[in-house]
Amino acid sequence: MRITNKRKKLYEVSQRLSKVARGVEKADLVIKNGTLVNVFSGELLKHMDISISEGRIAYVGNADHTIGDHTEIIDANNQYLVPGFLDAHMHVESTMLSVTQFAKAAIAKGTTGIFMDPHEIANVFGVEGVQLMHEEGQQLPLKVYTTFPSCVPATTDMEDAGASLGVEDIKAGLQWDNVAGLGEVMNFPGVVYGDPTMSGEIEETMKVNKAVTGHFPDEDNHLLQAYIASGVTSDHETVTREQGLEKVRLGMHLMIREGSAWHDVKEVIKIVTEDKVNTDNISLVTDDVYPQTLIEKGHLNHVVRRAIEEGVDPVTAIQMATINVARYFKLDQDLGAIAPGKYADILLMEDLNKVEPSTVVTDGEVIFENEKIVKPFPEFIYPEHVRNSIHLKSTLKPEDFLLHSESKQAKTGVNVIKIIENSARTEKMTAILKIVDGVIRPDVEKDIIQLACIDRHHASGQISLAYAHGFQLKKGAVASTVAHDSHNLLVMGTNKEDMAFAANELAKMGGGMIVVEDQKVLARVSMPIAGLMSDQPLETVVKEVQQLEEAWKDIGCPLNAPFMTFSLIALPVIPEIRISNRGIVDVTEFMLIQVETES
C-alpha cells in the first residue's frame, strides 16, 4: 500500500492565496479577534485575524476584506493564536500507540507536526516497518515527518536485531516524500572513528541537504567536536547545563528533552534563564513519552509549560517548539509560524502559561474543540506478519534461566547492571552471590535480581543471563518485548518459574509488557504491532498501563515508570553496562564481558 499525502505544495496554491490576501477571492476560513503570538518578532499582537484558504494562511491582520458569503468564521474572542507545536525528535513506538492513535492524543494537546524516528520498528522489520509507519502518518491531520533510522541495529557486534539497514537503504529512504533527515546517530564511536556505514549514511544525507540528527551522551570534548565535524548537527541527550552550553557554542542544534522518564528541562534550560544564550538554535522535544503522560500532562505542550515554569518567557518557549524546529529541518517555508503561505496549523489558547489549547486547527480545518476530536481519522491496517513477530525456538522452561558457575567455590563475584531512576544511564557494579549445586543464585534481599535477554527474531534459542540492581522486586517476574533497540525478549524476576511463565505468556500475546506472580498474570499491555505498539485506543492503553504500574508496585518496585527504565536495560549505546541477547555489554569499552568477575 502506497499512500500519497494530499497536502498541496505552496507553488500549487500560491496564486489563490495571493488573490485571497488582496480580497479578490474569499477565504475558506477566518479566525477573528485573537492575540497573535509572533514567533518572528517575539511580539504579542492584539486584535488579529487569520485568513485561510487551501489549507494555508493567506492573510494576517484585519481580514474583513477576505470574508465572503461562504467563509466560515471562528471568533477567537481574544484568545492567543499560537503556531502548532512541532516535536523535533520522538519515537511514536514509545507511546505504545499506533501512529493514528498517537495523533489523536497529540493533536488534542496542540502538537500538529512531529519528526519521528521509527528505529524501534526498523529493528524488527527493517525498511518495511519504517515504510508502514511513515505511510500511516501520511494520511493523518497530524503532519508526520520521518527521520530515517541510522543505527539498525544500534551496534553491529553486541546484539542481534530482527533486521538491519545499510547505506543504500538510507539513500533510498531519503528520497521519500516527507523524510526530513537521518535519525539519531547513536553509534557515535562509529562516527568519530570513521565506520564506513556511519560515514556513508551521513554523507548521503548531507548530499541531499537534509538534517543529520544526533545522539551524544558522552562528555569528551574531542569526541564531541569530531562528531560535529563529521556532519551531525543536533543532539537530544544533553543532561547538564555545561554540556548544553558547550554544544550551543559549537553550533549544534540543542534539543532539550522532557519525556516520561527523562526530565532534562530543569537543568539544561539554565543556559537560557541564567546564561542568556541565543535560543534560535534550541528546540524542545519529548523523545519518549508513554500513554499516562499524554493523558495527565500532555505532549509537547507539557515540555513548553515546563520551560515556562523554569523561567523562560512564554513566547521564547513557543519559538523553541515551532519556528526553531522548522528552520532546523529547512521546512520553515511551510511550518513553524502564523504567516502568509504557511500551513494553517493554529492553536487557540486562553493562557500562554498553562499551554492548553481550546481549539486546534490543522490544514485549515478544526480538528479539536470542546475537549474532543471532531474529525474522523482514517483507519490503517498492519499486515498479519507484522502482528505476529515473536519467534521463539521453543517454549521456555524454568531451567533455561539457571546461570551455571565456572567456580568451584561456595560464592562467586558477578557483574551487575545497576539502574538509575528517571535516567537512561546505568552503572556497573559487582556483587557476591551464592553458588548452590553449581548454579549462581540471585539475592532478592540485596536486590540482585535475575535478568535474561532472549532472541525473539530468529528462533535461535539464544538466551543470555545476567543480574540487575535497583528495581527492588520482592516476588514475581516481569517481561517485555519493548527492549531498546533490538527489541528482543527481556525477562526479569525473583524466581525461574515466574520468569518462564512471563516469557511464554508474552509470546502468546504477540508481544508487549507483562507482570506475573505465582504463574498468574497480574497485568499486561498487549502490543501486537511488531511487539511494540498496541492496536487499541489511547484510553484502553492508558488503563492497561495503569494496571501495569500497579502490578510493578505490587511485586515490590517503587520506581517511577519502571517499565520504561526496564526497556532501556538492553540498549548497548548508553553507558555504562547493558544486557543483549549475546551477553553483558560494557558500553564504556564497547565489548562483551563475562557475568562472573575474575575475583
Image (tube, rainbow, N blue to C red):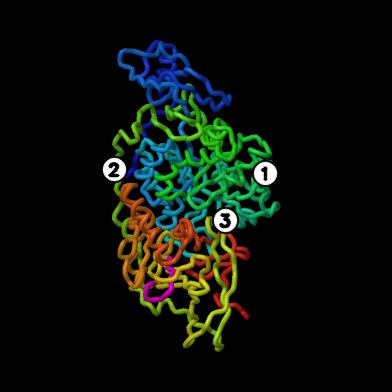
Q: Which of marks 3 and 2 is in front?
A: 2
Q: What element carries label 2?
A: loop
For marks 1 and 2, give the CA distance.
44 Å
Circle 2 is placed at which residue position?
379
Earlier-in-chain disc, 3 versus 2: 3
Q: How crowded is mark 2: few (under 14 residues within 10 Å), some or many (20 or more)?
A: few
Front position in the image: 192 or 306: 306
* First of labels 1, 3 by sequence position: 3
Q: Label 1 belongs to which residue?
A: 245
Dividing the picture into quadrants, the one containing residue 452 is bottom left
In the rendered image, is residue 179 in sight?
Answer: no
Q: What residue type is labelled 1?
A: Leu
Magenta span: 490-498
| Residue at screen point 31% across, 69% down | 520
Q: Is mark 3 on a helix, strand or loop?
A: loop
Q: In the rendered image of this protein, does residue 128 appear above or below residue 582?
A: above
CA–CA distance in space, label 3 to label 2: 36 Å
Q: Is residue 115 left or right of residue 589?
A: left
Q: Nearer the viewer's eye, disc 1 or disc 3? A: 1
Position of residue 455 measured from the top left corner of the image (x, y, whole percent): 42, 67
What's the amino acid at mark 3?
A: Asn
